[in-house]
Image (cartoon, helix red, strand yellow):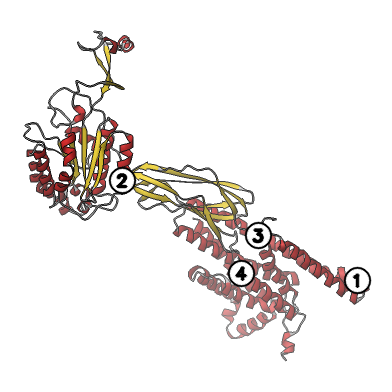
Amino acid sequence: MLTQRTLKFILLFCGTLITGLILGNLIVIILSLLPLCLLTAALILNPPGHLKLGDYKKASRVWVGDQIEIKYQITAESGAGCFSVFQEIPPYFSLVEGNNFRVFWKGWKPQTFIYTYKICCTKRGLYKVLPLKWEANHPLYLKKPAGGTLGEAYDLTVSPKIFNVRRVRGIPGIATSPFPVIDVAKLGVATTDFREIRNYVYGDPIKNINWKATARSTSPQPWPLVNEYEVEGKKAVWLYLDASGILEVGTDIENAFEYCLEAANSVLYFFLDRGYRVGMYVFNNNEKLFYPDAGQKQFLKISRELIGLKAENKYDEFPIAVEKCRHYMLGYNPLCVIVTGLDNRHSESIVKGARKLRVMRGRQRRKLPLMVINVAGYNVMPARNDYEINNPVIMKLNTRPRIMQLRKLGASVLDWNPRKESFGTALLKLMKVQ
Amino acid sequence: MAILLINIAEWVLIAIIGLCGTLAFASSGLYSLLHNSLLSHYPDIGHYLIAIIWVFLALVGIFSVSFQRKGGGFLTWLAFILTAPSILAFNKLNIPGILGSQYKFTTDLAFWQALVLAAVILTAYLLLNFMRESKLFRLGLVKKQADPADIENVSVKSHQTLILALLGALVLTAVISLIAVNLESFLLPGFSRLPWNVVLIGIACLLFLAVYVYWLGARQTPSDK
């Protein structure tokens, strides 16, 4: 298709030729040849075409905060001129390196170009990576631009971030919280999962001594080292996740609800990785219950659900959730982990639910196996002025009575500030022993 | 930096168009008439008439191209109007005589000199036109936040192609015009010996053959190509 400019040139040629012929002027006739020759020379050229895409990597599953490198090899086989390539970045992705809009110049010969850029996933979800769009221009803009798409669209799953919770060695003593990880299991059948190498103590089977490691030991007082293996029969963990709309404090990308999901995912990964049976109930939402199970399959099952989870406008359903999970609470006697925000007026329901859990445990004097992870919205919101800097302090003081109530009930409360520390660090603080 | 270079190139082209128009006008009989008349009334202005015309053309060009962001169309028209008296001096047809006037267009320029001046004006106009388009394209790329390095690369290559195409067109025009000018002396002795009906039938056959070849080419499907 020709452009208006081409028509202008044709008119210029016709006009000067006719004028030259009418006047019988050879100069004007010769002048008319100039636009004609230019048009002829230019219209023989075609904009770049026959674009082909080389092999490219399709990332299908990434974590929040991960950087993905998008790289394509584009070969232009025919034509000459410039062509632009553009790929729409899915929503909530940020461009970290490079540019997703590139312009290339193709010469006379077939040429290969590298189109690359890096993006960062800022929010969990299921996204579609659209195909590349290209537009080729005539080198002298005398033909209308040609365009099309390259490649195919593909799905990209962004899972909530898993915080790297480090390994905690079993230290004998009374734990400040009934955290099953640091329970020193004396009984149980040893599995083939290696845990650690430690010094021999009286009573250890002789067959467990690692002779090679003992021989390599450089200690001045040599002592046999034994292999220790994980034992079977670990405790169950029950996760209550708050999916109330009131938690969506902050921006669309960074808000308390998103941090709650990340914390839940991390807790889930942490326990499932260590062989615990983990069940979950999402409250203040449409009653999503996951039966307690162990293994990677359970993690994938729950994690997939967390990717698409949206907050609902429900606020005080925790006591109902406890009631609904009563059967599991009594049957498994699990460690309960509640991921929520306590800095709102509906957090009273969390205290009510904790009381119910306490009642279910009977008249035990032991510490209540309940951990509340408080992701406070006031930590997420950046202060806009000097006055707002004090807001988190006031909000924290406002939340304190509820935290005290929960602690009185025997629960451990983890006040997590995602801006200050990683979830792993916060979790480790809670797991220390007396 | 690149934008500055393009702007400077535009101003140089504007100055060239103005200069060619002024030179062509200054060589015409009409200019002598105007100059003599001005000298008798305003002797101070008359001496600088050429410079005044050139500066006026250059200012008009800079205003329309750089400030109004239009092509060099208006300036080229002005330059051609000024060149017209010199070009019209080479007419086979006496237009003023047909209109009943006794005036005759005259020029001090030779045929080739007039042709070169007119060709330079037209080439500069075409260059200005393409440069404007290239500038708009460049602005579009900047708006779309393309890499500055990519924009520079495309801009440089685009200008190179434009200059190559224009040079090619100029060479082709020169060759055709050389042939056309000397065609008469080459072909006329041969054609004068042929009977007119043979020439007519020959031309008709040639046209028919050309149409047939074109039709054969157009009939091809894209897969054949």
Answer with mark 4 or mark 1, whichever residue precedes in sequence.
4
The amino acid marked with disc number 2 is Glu
Q: Chain of mark 1?
A: B
Residue A433 is drawn in which quadrant?
Answer: top left
Q: Amino acid at mark 3?
A: Ala
Q: Which residue is mark 2?
A: A305
- Tell me the CA gap for discs 3 and 4: 20 Å
The residue labelled by disc 1 is B189
Q: CA distance from mark 4 to mark 1?
A: 41 Å
Characterize the local packing of mark 1: few (<14), some (14-19) or many (20 or more) Cα atoms within 10 angstroms. Answer: few
Could you say which is closer to the camera, residue B10 or residue A281? A281
> The disc labelled 1 sits on which kind of residue?
Pro
Write down the chain letter for disc 2. A
Whole-angstrom CA distance, mark 2 to mark 3, is: 61 Å
Residue at x 16%, y 29% (from the top left corner) = A432
User: Separation of disc 2 and disc 4 at Cα?
Assistant: 71 Å
